[in-house]
Amino acid sequence: MFIFSPSGAVNYLVLAAGKCILSLEVGTSEISSFNLPERKDPAEADDEDDSKTKSSGEINRDIQNCAVFGNKFLAITTNDKCLFVFSVTNWHPLEANLIAERKIPRVSSATCFSRDGKCLLVADKSGDCTKYNCSQENLPEQQLGGHLSIVTDILLTADEKFFITSDRDEKIRVTKFPESYEIETYCMGHREFVSKIDLLPHDESLLVSLSGDSSIRLWEYLKGKEIYRIDLPGAGIQMVCRAEGSSSRSSSLFAVYINETDSLVIIRISGSSSFQHEIVKTISTEDFFVDSLNFSNSQLLVFGVSQKDDYHAEIRAFDTSNWDPIDLSRVNESLKDRLGSFRNNNPGETISGLFKKKYSNIEEYHERKRKRLELKKANK
């Protein structure tokens, strides 16, 4: 599930969820949309994500990841291992033409466009990273190497000389781009999965990472050196950030979703050579799983699933001047009719699988040892 506000738009939002892309006019709750192309051959279901539908003979094609390039292109990957690139002529009412389509080797886990929109980077759940040339209809691919774990996020540096990837096994890797045969460095130190990475908005020479080990960390990524750390009240799941201030842009504002505490934590990080931070606000998200965050003009947009009985998709918004909630009840009623229930596809259920499985067999070992000694004693 993804939410964003197209460049220059102040009164409408674009959502990607389930099988469709929706453009929503906030004032009137008017929705325009288009659905993904239907799957041509149901017999192609061969991925573990399709296993639930094999037995019933039905294939559910749902959006897995989404990437946007300005007001021009929209890329969608799906759970049945397809990549679609659309040329957008108008965001509202929504008008987009499918310009390229292809199968991809694995189910994707993260995507991003290059800054010129000519290529798309796709990371997947098997650890591979691939570049697709979007200027050609068949989307030719180039392998960029991979991890031995699920890649959780991917981005290009500001100068596009490096691409940076994070994974489930605490690693952040900095690799040269597009000649990806040479790894520049690793940023090591997290103790749980790295859920999100981004360039620090007010200083793009630095990297910021969010992790399930309840921390945000700042890095000199070309040296693999950690330079600042913020401890959080729980595992960080989602993050969005933007620069603040005047032309000097001396600070960055972060919104971080903490699933364990059902809250959004708003953090301001300021400084350059030395850093400091403050907790601006903590916002409750009780009974609501946040799957996507975005800043839009003077608002923080939050898109997720209500974890009450109906499991409907829901948008929440907050005014960044005072962090008061914005009433979107009318909008959410419209979404219920259009998107339906996410009971069988609740994104919150995937989070537990990212944590390390802690296993100790010491008690079992002592029990087996006790039984062996008793048996040995009995046989004497």
Image (tube, rainbow, N blue to C red):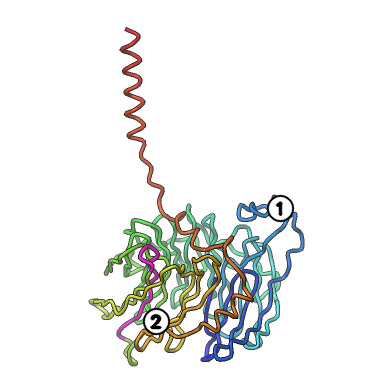
Is residue 125 covered in magenta?
A: no
Query: In front here: 6 or 101?
Result: 6
Quarter of the image where the C terminus is located: top left
Q: Position of residue 72 (x, y in %)?
A: 61, 84
Q: From the viewer's perspective, is 172 left or right of 82?
A: left
Upstream in sequence: badge 2 or badge 1: 1
Q: Position of residue 59 (x, y in %)?
A: 70, 59
Q: From the viewer's perspective, is 43 left or right of 377?
A: right
Query: In front here: 356 or 248?
Result: 356
Query: Extreme front residue here?
Result: 309
Pointer 2 with pointer 1, Cβ within 8 A: no
Q: Position of residue 208 (x, y in %)?
A: 36, 71
Query: In front here: 23 or 65?
Result: 23
The residue at 47%/72% (across/down) is 156
What is the three-letter code of the residue carrying label 1? Ser
Q: Where, by quadrant of the figure, is residue 270 drawn? A: bottom left
User: In the image, which residues are magenta?
Assistant: 250-262
Query: Extreme right residue here?
Result: 40
Q: From the viewer's perspective, is 86 left or right of 277?
A: right
* Majority secondary structure in the magenta region: strand
Is residue 258 covered in magenta?
A: yes
Quarter of the image where the N terminus is located: bottom right
Q: Where, by quadrant of the figure, is residue 252 drawn? A: bottom left
Instruction: From the image, tell me which residue sits under label 2.
Output: 242
What is the three-letter code of the residue carrying label 2? Arg
Instruction: From the image, tell me which residue sits under label 1.
Output: 56
